[in-house]
Image: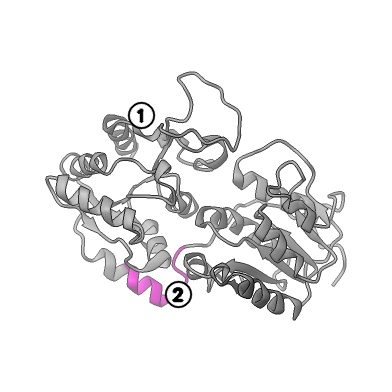
Amino acid sequence: MSAVLPGRDTSAPFGQVPLDRVLIVMLAAVGDAVHALPVVNAIKRMHPRARISWVMQTGALTQLLTGHPHIDEVIPFSRKEGWRGFAAVRRALRAQSYDAVLVLQPYLKSGIVASFAPSPLRLGFDRARARDASWIFSNAQIPARPLQHMQDQYLEFLAALGVPALPLEWQIGPWNELERAWQSAFFARYQRPVAPIVVATSKAEKDWPADRWAQVSDALWHDFGLQPLLVGGRSAREVEAERIIFERARVKPASALGDGGLRGLAAIIEKSALVLSPDTGPLHLSVALGTPVISLLGYTNPKRVGPYRKYGELMIDAYGEPGEDYPVSMENRPGRMTRITVQQVLDKVQQWASSN
């Protein structure tokens, strides 16, 4: 293959790098992985014969992305096994070679894993944006610039490689007949349009009180003709939120906690009418799938991790003070999720309903 791909911007810092074999290093976090998918799809769109591998931690993320039409290989990394996990992924990566390694997750363990992959180019974040000194494991960095939305920061890797980012594509919905059949059977249970409620996140500080979700659930049923559906996993906090909602709601909502795993969740979100979610993976899945989502943010910076270029009008921002023009930052602001009222959420539901 020619060193310069047709249509690529060869004035980009790494615009003449071959992309026959590409390794993505994104070990964990569903939301971050969703933001990384446009990078994968853009490379594959530019060069359909490229082989794209992705090293990721075993667990939910592996289950979500295994089988993606543009990911040729998933290389599992078991962080729970400690040094044995690092040794195993080192053996797997050393058995191959890559034209480019894209270190999309700027953390120490990601940098260490990336260093195992033989490649003339291990491209990571600039020093200012790389955490835990992870930049030392990359032999090249994308050009330095201020913090942006996470999606835009991943697209910077495409700009550095001279690969056009647009149109943004995720391709995260059901991939085959089996998943479509599961989706059809799932929705056959309900007579109303479905509105998933994401009851909890990976951090308690990002959650919204479960008793308030109970009130929203009742309003979805009584006032908007929607079928409220609790979604997520079955962690202790999610199960406790489910218990509280069941106890407080006048009409018990349906629950799909743990139903179908993350692939099932993607199928549910794709065919739903409206999603309600704090800052967590399903929020970004909703944006990727084109399903309207009411997002509740207070702990994390909405300009960095809020819904990307869609459904911003449905976002409730409790992070900033009224009128505050806060910068994009990684600063978290504890204690702000409880500022969001039930009425604010219902006002957003009404706004959505009025536009449909």
Q: Is residue 180 magenta?
A: yes
Label for residue 176? 2
Residue 135 placement, left or right of 186: right
Disc 2, disc 1: CB below 8 Å?
no
Question: Image height check: is 214 above or below 82?
Answer: above
Residue 1 placement, left or right of 263: right
Picture coordinates of residue 171, whole percent (x, y): 53, 62
Q: Main secondary structure of the magenta part?
A: helix
Quadrant of the snapshot with the C terminus: top left
Q: Which residues are magenta?
A: 173-183
Q: Is residue 322 magenta?
A: no
Question: Image height check: is 18 above or below 91?
Answer: above
Mark 2: few, some, or many residues within 10 Å (few <14, many ≥20)?
few
Q: Which residue is mark 1?
A: 339
Q: Residue furthest top?
A: 323
Q: Tell which circle, 2 or 1, labels the residue nearer the N-terminal end.
A: 2
Picture coordinates of residue 30, whole percent (x, y): 51, 57
Instruction: Depth check: give the residue in front, 31 or 49.
Output: 31
Picture coordinates of residue 115, whole percent (x, y): 76, 65
Residue 319 placement, left or right of 164: left
Residue located 35% across and 57% down the image: 232
Residue 249 placement, left or right of 288: left
Mark 1: few, some, or many residues within 10 Å (few <14, many ≥20)?
few
Residue 347: name its quadrant.
top left
Residue 188: name its quadrant.
bottom left
Res. 72 in view: no
Picture coordinates of residue 80, whole percent (x, y): 54, 69
